[in-house]
Image (cartoon, coloured by chain):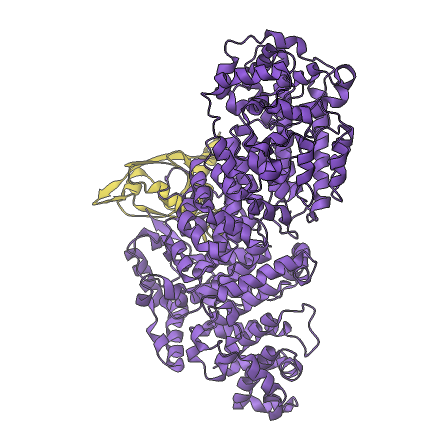
Amino acid sequence: MSFMPGQPVSTVVQRIEIHKLRDGDNLILGFSIGGGIDQDPSQNLFSEDKTDKGIYVTRVSKGGPAEVAGLRMGDRIMQVNGWDMTMVTHDQARKKLTKKNEDVVRLLVTRKTLEDAVRQSMMQH
Amino acid sequence: MPEQSPSNQTSLAMMQEPQEVVEETVTIEEDPGTPTSHVSVVTSDDGTTRRTETKVIKVVKTITRRTFQPVILIESKPSTPVPPSTPTPSETKPVTKMVKTVTTRTVRQVPLGPDGLPLPEGSSPLGSYTDSIDRRYMKNGERFITPQATSTLTRSYNNYSDSYNDTPDSQFRHYALHDGYGDVADNYGSLSRGVSYRPYRPYMPTGGYRPENSYTLPIRKDDYGHVAQPQVPMGSSTVDLNRSQPERFQPEPYGLEDDRRSLGPEDEEPYDLEPDYSTANRRTLPGRSIREPLRNGPRVRGYEDPIEAELIDERHPYIHGMYPAPLAQPERGSLASLDRMGGRRSPSIDSIRKDPRWRDPDLPEVIAMLGHPIDPVKSNAAAYLQHLCYENDKIKKDVRQLKGIPVLVGLLDHPKAEVHRKACGALRNISYGKDHDNKVAIKSCDGIPALIRLLRKTNDMEVRELITGTLWNLSSYEPLKMVIINHGLQTMTNEVIIPHSGWELEPNEDSKPRDAEWTTVFKNTSGCLRNVSSDGAEARRRLRECGGLVDALLHALQSAVGKKDMDNKSVENCVCIMRNLSYHVHKEVPGAEKFQDPSALQGPGSAGTQRKKKDDAGCFGGKKAKEEWFNQGRKNGEHDKNYDTLDLPKRTEPTKGFELLYQPEVVRLYLSLLTESQNYNTLEAAAGALQNLSAGQWTWSNYIRATVRKEKGLPILVELLRSDSDKVVRAVAIALRNLSIDHRNKDLIGSYAMRDLVSNLPSGQQRPAKNLDEDTVVAILNTIHEIITDSSENARSLITAQAIDKLVAINKTSQSARETKAAFHVLQTVWSYKELRNTLTKDGWNKTHFQPIATGTPKGSKSCKPGYDDTTLPLMEKNQGNRGCSAGDMIPMDELSPDGYSTIDQRDKDSKYKSSDGSSDLQEREPLKNDTNRKHYIRSNRPTVSLVDACDVKPQPVDSWV
């Protein structure tokens, strides 16, 4: 799976809807992200292609909203509420995820296992 | 420590002045849009009229062009692709040519020549006005050879002469062409109403009446004058006309004769009620070099307006004088006046020959017309003035002495866009140049607040460009800087800087951050602010505290870095402002004392160790320190979450305003500029900003110095030591010196930069290829001195770099006392390391080489001016004795006295004006052209300099919890 930033990507995606957890003033999603076009892509532990500057899920807190919604470590976030995440800075991605006025975040993610699954099912046929 | 003073060096050199070619192009591009609006203006049901209007549009284009050519500013010849503008005489020629071309085109396209008044964009219905004039004239009878329509007449002269020559009818025809008065249509509305326009049709020439050669005004003729002057009855029709008009016009706002008179030139007399106008005219001519032939006929045509003629009374003889006498004998007077023009043969002379009846207005007339009750006349007069003033210091001076400047300033508040636009254009040209009296004259009649008022009011881009251009020009004169700050700082920031920078106070999270727009308005305004930012501590304070200014500038620069568009003038201006505002931040910003590094107050030794400890913790401190940052970052909230490399003071709220100036984040910005920009001025300013920020003893400069290292800035700076630009080398050298206050930096610079520093030194009297300034050489020597102080390792690398040869040679033979002295101090320090003496003696040096040369001593003592002492250099106290003096040599860049800046400015001004003579200044700038190639060459040849801390090589991946 390789990406050309800014180009349409055809890949297997999964929709994930996370309901934020309210903790006082804070809204918690329960995962952490890494990557972004301003970050060093070679340090991304999850990407296959070490030049990929996409946003990845680096950690998912146990029992948090993200885990409940099915998000997994290593997922590559394609969109957040319709906003493209394949060509944004780390901070832009963070801001899109942490808007105070949104209780629900809809993610479009892709993950290696998903692709593998699809590939396998296709091979079976 | 030396800081780079807020000089507006380069920006001064860039002070605006018209530059023809560039602007011309722009105007041409604008042309296509113009016709549409004008066409729509046509209200008349008459086809002819419509055509006329189209034609007017063309004329307008012409005018615009001409107007603009003079308008463009920027004298920076080297940086523009256009050849430097030449002295006035030759420079006007191309202009005329342009006009000719356009006019010809116009003629071809439109059979009917208008009077050529520039139409304001989106002007009001002209047709009715035109009609009304025609109608009126029709009604009154045939004989209405009023002064109006001059240019049209002129233009058409060649063509219609066959059929219409000298017949009143033919003259009459031109009235139909008066559609240039869109502005005044309202006033004349009453006229057109109720008057049948039918009769005028027969007179409308359909084809044979092609205007041409509209370059000149009609020469004043006797009978023309009569028409204009009621009290000299000429024909019955004239009388009728004059009698009938007053009733119609009384309600109109034309009874302003007194005003006009008061605005007129003081020497009205020559123009007074002279029956023979050509004579009167001639009388005034001698010695009036300002009387140029009119090159842009269309612009002035509007003066000869029939209505205007009716309104004029004998009190404004100079205005009367303007009226052409189309029917007068062409042979007479025109040629005579031609001769009188003396050597001043302008291109339009040809056209005068062709149609000798027209002439140009002279300067007092033009200035008088600024007070004319009819708006288009005002705007045309202003436009013509702008044209006349283009790079013509003599005319600027004459305009000033004829008291034209207050009138122009008064027109800035005129409600009609066309009028204030043209007035602004004239002021822009007048404000340009080394004659500061013109600038002062604009200021003295409250021109600065008027400009600012207009800036607040208008949305017209062109007007805004003119206003800000004028302000830029004014800002180059020291005494006006504070005035501009007082009246315009916040307005310029709010109206121009912030909107064009893309910065938003409360950014909408959903929208992408906007990029800066490098508009001319932004360029002009930033240039103006750049100039005023050099006006001392108070000016800096005002700019720093101006709401949103620093934020917007930073945003603009960041956007420039993001788009890799860093070579333009606007970026240069912004960086220079930032540099200037960074000067003395550690002393001047509110609350600075809270951040003063206590170690600064102690002796040099202890300060050094303390600093060292702290910085090492910052850089190598290992896990513990890192964790501390991490925790601190957390406490500080989201803002700092990603910033895991620095130990920042706690921030309770997001940084804004002047605090942004010295946040370690700006280091990355400046380093990006230093890496990417090809513009020497930008490079110099960015290095200067780092220099300023890394000077001084307060918490922030400690962070800045460490951040430069962590952001891998040292190799970038060292590389720039190889720049071809003297001033870049100088700024970088001083920045390195300030950075080496940090001991880790000092070690790194000593190990890796020494060779490049030394290579910039001259070998005795033989200068290196680069031929650096004395200032630069001294700066480099002082940097070397700083680096080897307290570091025998660095002194050793100095020896390894074969510097001793050069230093001894400079010490012995340099013509410059300052260089000698600085070199001596370095040598002295080297010799003071006993452990190195062995090496030195092996190389054949002995003690005498490290002593002041006997003959050099007096030189040296002379060079050390008493004023240049430690006090100005915040860090000087940590150095011993002799050192202060050597460092002091750089102080001209520093705040020697409140006037320290002006000294620099003055120097720049001087060099700027020198440059027109092709003197030294040009030499220095010449390399600009080779810049790109040269730099790449250097870059590719550059050995890998590992001038970075090991721990910083790999930035930690950022990981944000959400």
Q: Position of residue B45 (x, y in %)?
A: 57, 10
Q: From what the image shows, is residue B651 above or below residue B155? A: below
B326 vs B367: above or below = above
Please state the horizontal and vertical placement of residue B776, each as a whole percent of the image: 59, 70
Residue situated in front as seen by the camera: B430 or B311? B311
Left or right of residue B858, residue B536 in this image: left
Q: Residue furthest left?
A: A24
Q: Position of residue B335 (x, y in %)?
A: 77, 34
Q: Quadrant of residue B545 in the image?
A: bottom left
Count of all numbered marks drawn on residues in the image: 0
Seen from the viewer's position, the closer of residues A61 and B686 is B686
Kindly identify the residue that appears in the image at 34 percent across and 71 percent down. Answer: B597
* B721 and B855: which is toward the camera: B855
| Residue B667 can be seen, yes or no | no
- Residue at point 48%, 63% (across, down): B690
Classify B649 as above or below B598. Answer: above
B481 is higher (above) or lower (below) than B803: above
Determine the image quadrant of residue B43: top right
Which of B782 and B756 lies nearest the eye of the viewer? B782
Task: Label the purple chain with its letter.
Answer: B
Residue drawn at x 66%, y 8% is B202
Residue B339, image x, y percentages? 77, 39
Task: For chain A, give the colour.
Answer: yellow
Residue A61 can be seen in this image: yes
- Residue at 77 percent of width and 14 percent of height: B163
Indicate left or right for B444 with B295 as reference: left
